Amino acid sequence: MNDSLKTLLIVAFLVVILWNLGAGLYYMLVDKGTTKRTVNALTKRIALSVALILLVGLAIYMGWITPHGVGG
């Protein structure tokens, strides 16, 4: 897999995670606790965060990506 494609995949995950975080904040302010949209948005964010951590861990284990120091 191309290095830029790997980076794009991780950045896309982070953008979707931030989108769900913003959606949770918006629903919390707009709905005032009358719906479960806030809980659903934050649950999706947590699930995506866990999936990203597991994906990165798997990629490091399989040798698809190699961790390096800052500026390395």
Image (tube, helix red, strand yellow):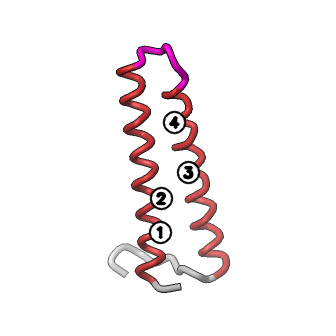
Mark 1 and mark 3: Cα distance apart in space: 13 Å
Q: Tell me the residue that label 2 is attached to.
A: 13
Precedes in sequence: disc 4 or disc 1: 1
Q: Tell me the residue that label 1 is attached to.
A: 9
Range shown magenta: 31-36
Precedes in sequence: disc 4 or disc 3: 4
Tags 1 and 2 in contact by the CB under 8 Å rule?
Answer: yes
Q: Point out residue 55 in the picture as x, y percentages from the top left corner.
A: 61, 65
Tags 3 and 2 in contact by the CB under 8 Å rule?
Answer: yes
Q: Point out residue 36 in the picture as x, y percentages from the top left corner.
A: 55, 23
Mark 2 and mark 4: Cα distance apart in space: 15 Å
Q: Tell me the residue that label 3 is attached to.
A: 48
Q: Residue type at mark 3?
A: Leu
Q: Secondary structure at mark 2?
A: helix
Q: Residue furthest bottom?
A: 2
Q: Tell me the residue that label 4 is attached to.
A: 42
Mark 3 and mark 2: Cα distance apart in space: 7 Å
